[in-house]
Image (cartoon, helix red, strand yellow):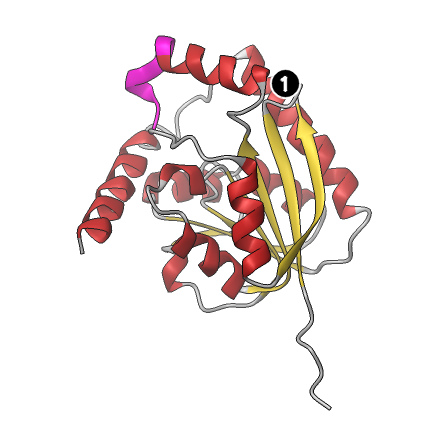
């Protein structure tokens, strides 16, 4: 019960974070470089796998959702913040206010950019990502264990502590282990922007055939 209360509070923090999402958006130089790295990596990935229906969980202002929309995929963004969703809709992107745990659809690719590390216990939310996936789950996760990732996180906390939503210092291996234990194998583990973050693509393993 205590965890649920904390998660509800986190949803309120995110909504406050995105409150000015419909205003002019600003990005640091590093932020722009990181987005280009993600854009290039996802673009190459979409050329390697065959997907039709995509959901972007925790879509925020729609930066990653825009990539799927431009690729002419049947995509949907969901977010707990009405302010974030409104910003997406203003851009012509398909997005709705919804919690991950309330999503009942099924998608070829379930995509998430940096959400899991904000939960004290990320496992239930990772399992929800897997639950709604027919084949793939894509995670874009900060890599706090790399030199560049750890340094950038330290600087961000030093300079912008009051504007950031707290991140727990999970390892990339923590996500790989949990997904592996739940029937998803890692098929892509790609560094982004000098290993500040990682692109992780998991594929659902087929159920064994009983004979």
Q: Is residue 16 above or below residue 28?
A: below
Q: Is residue 150 visible in this depiction of the protein?
A: yes
For label 1, the crowd category at 10 Å Cα-Cα, with few meaning under 14, some 14 to 19 and many 20 or more, is some
Q: Residue at x 28, y 18 (%)?
A: 162
Closest to the observer, 190 or 75? 190
Q: Secondary structure at mark 1?
A: helix
Closest to the observer, 197 or 174? 174
Q: Is residue 29 above or below residue 201?
A: above
Q: Residue at x 45, y 69 (%)?
A: 104
Residue 209 lies within the magenta run? no
Which residue matches tag 1? 33
Task: Kindly give the residue lying farthest to the right in the view shown.
Answer: 48
Task: Kindly give the residue lying farthest to the bottom in the view shown.
Answer: 211
Tell me where the magenta segment starts and ends, as one range. Answer: 158-165
Closest to the observer, 180 or 190? 180
Residue 159 lies within the magenta run? yes
Q: Residue at x 34, y 43 (%)?
A: 81
Q: Main secondary structure of the magenta part?
A: helix
186 sits left or right of 62 in the view: right
Q: Is residue 76 visible in this depiction of the protein?
A: no
Q: Residue 1, image x and y in percent?
A: 18, 56
Quadrant of the snapshot with the C terminus:
bottom right
Q: Is residue 45 above or below residue 167?
A: below
Q: Residue 183, image x and y in percent?
A: 60, 63
Q: Residue 110, image x and y in percent?
A: 58, 54
Q: Residue 124, image x and y in percent?
A: 39, 56
Total labels drawn: 1
42 sits left or right of 153 in the view: right
15 sits left or right of 45 in the view: left
């Amino acid at each position: 019960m205590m965890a649920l209360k904390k998660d509800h509070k986190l949803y309120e923090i995110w909504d406050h974070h995105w409150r000015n999402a419909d205003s002019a958006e600003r990005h640091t130089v590093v932020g722009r470089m990181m987005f280009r790295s993600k854009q290039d990596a996802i673009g190459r990935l979409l050329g390697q796998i065959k997907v039709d229906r995509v959901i972007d969980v925790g879509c925020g202002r729609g930066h990653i959702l825009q990539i799927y929309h431009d690729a002419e995929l049947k995509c949907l963004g969901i977010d707990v913040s009405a302010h974030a969703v409104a910003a997406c809709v203003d851009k012509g992107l398909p997005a709705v206010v919804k919690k991950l745990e309330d999503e009942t659809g099924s998608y070829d690719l379930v995509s998430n950019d940096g959400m899991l590390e904000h939960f004290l216990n990320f496992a239930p939310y990772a399992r929800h990502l897997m639950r709604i996936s027919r084949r793939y789950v894509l995670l874009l996760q900060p890599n706090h264990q790399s030199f560049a990732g750890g340094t950038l996180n330290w600087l961000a906390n030093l300079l912008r502590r009051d504007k950031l939503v707290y991140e727990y210092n999970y390892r990339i291996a923590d996500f790989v282990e949990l997904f592996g234990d739940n029937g998803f194998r890692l098929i892509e583990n790609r560094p982004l922007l000098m290993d500040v973050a990682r692109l992780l693509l998991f594929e659902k393993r087929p159920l064994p055939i009983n004979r």
